[in-house]
Amino acid sequence: MIVVKSGEGKLIEENSLIIKILIGLLVLAISVICIAINILLKYSEVMYRMLVTVLLILSALKVVFIAVSLLGILYIIRNRRSSRTMRKAALKAINLLIVPVIFLGRLAGIDKERIQRAYANLNNSIVYSAEYHLMPRDILLLLPHCLQNNECPHRIIGDIGNCVKCGKCSIKDILELTGRYPVKVAVVPGGTLARKMVNNLRPKAVVAVACERDLASGIRDTGHLLPVAGIFNERPNGPCFNTNVDVGKIEEAINYFCNGRCS
């Protein structure tokens, strides 16, 4: 089984961030339960007690859900392996919890982009905990259009083959990579078209290159349906303009899904 080790120390740190926020959510839900119980003991009005009882039940269910999700995620991170069912359940859980995680994180003064990066990396940890035996044709490589040099006259959205391989951007290296690993490739201008490509091409796994915001959004929309390996682009010139990507990380992800047998 191929092991992905890129940025392992940073990955552990960012996984810990999401776990800490999840623990904060758990503590918050338990606090709500304690307040609800206290109210039930103090007040006798039937309608009031019914409303508080509903709140108590919902909070209890939330506590159970977060606690089970935490245990599952911690097990996967610790053992670096999971069954198909456990992986899907963990991905579904973090996709459902990401909105309150971002909300609580912002209240705690944590930058939204940092939470989105941590979320995408936690998703990767879960995805990479399972073993895959896919063919290259089963994998879709999604690329943002901002990887292309802004002055290039050749339009590659819709057909990356229009690239003339001048070497002024990462697309040349990516084309050479996909020549060795014949995966499906799509260059997209945004999340809407990316989701459309996933629906139309129906891959069994996706390797997606994007910024933190777009990766978090895409993983939340499709990550519970199929494994998505997220790779952050590099933005030396600012967002959405002449960005770069570590092509080695793309190759690493493709190899993982193929279990080292893609080329």
Image (spheres, helix red, strand yellow):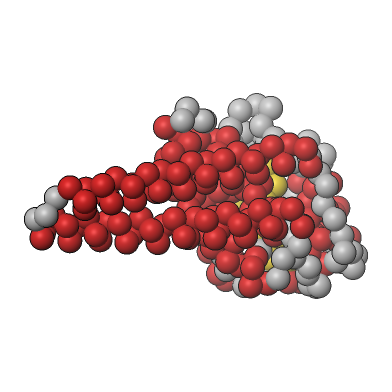
Give the vertical position of 49 relative to 113 (above or below): below
Q: Residue at x 66, y 32 (%)?
A: 235
On screen, residue 96 versus residue 209, left or right, reads left
Locate the C terminus and report the quarter of the image it occupies. Answer: bottom right
Q: Is residue 74 visible?
A: yes
Q: Position of residue 219 (x, y in %)?
A: 57, 55
Q: Residue at x 75, y 50 (%)?
A: 163
Quarter of the image for residue 59 reads: bottom left
Give the vertical position of 140 relative to 99 (above or below): below
Viewer-closest of 232 and 62: 62
Q: Position of residue 199 (x, y in %)?
A: 55, 69
Give the vertical position of 72 relative to 235 (above or below): below
Locate the N terminus and report the quarter of the image it occupies. Answer: bottom right
Q: Position of residue 259 (x, y in %)?
A: 85, 66
| Marker count (numbered) | 0
Q: Residue at x 58, y 35 (%)?
A: 114
Q: Is residue 191 visible?
A: no
Q: Residue at x 24, y 59 (%)?
A: 53
Q: Position of residue 239 (x, y in %)?
A: 58, 32
In the orientation shown, which residue stands out farthest toward the front?
A: 41
On screen, residue 154 versus residue 176, left or right, reads left
Viewer-closest of 120 and 56: 56
On screen, residue 69 versus residue 99, left or right, reads right
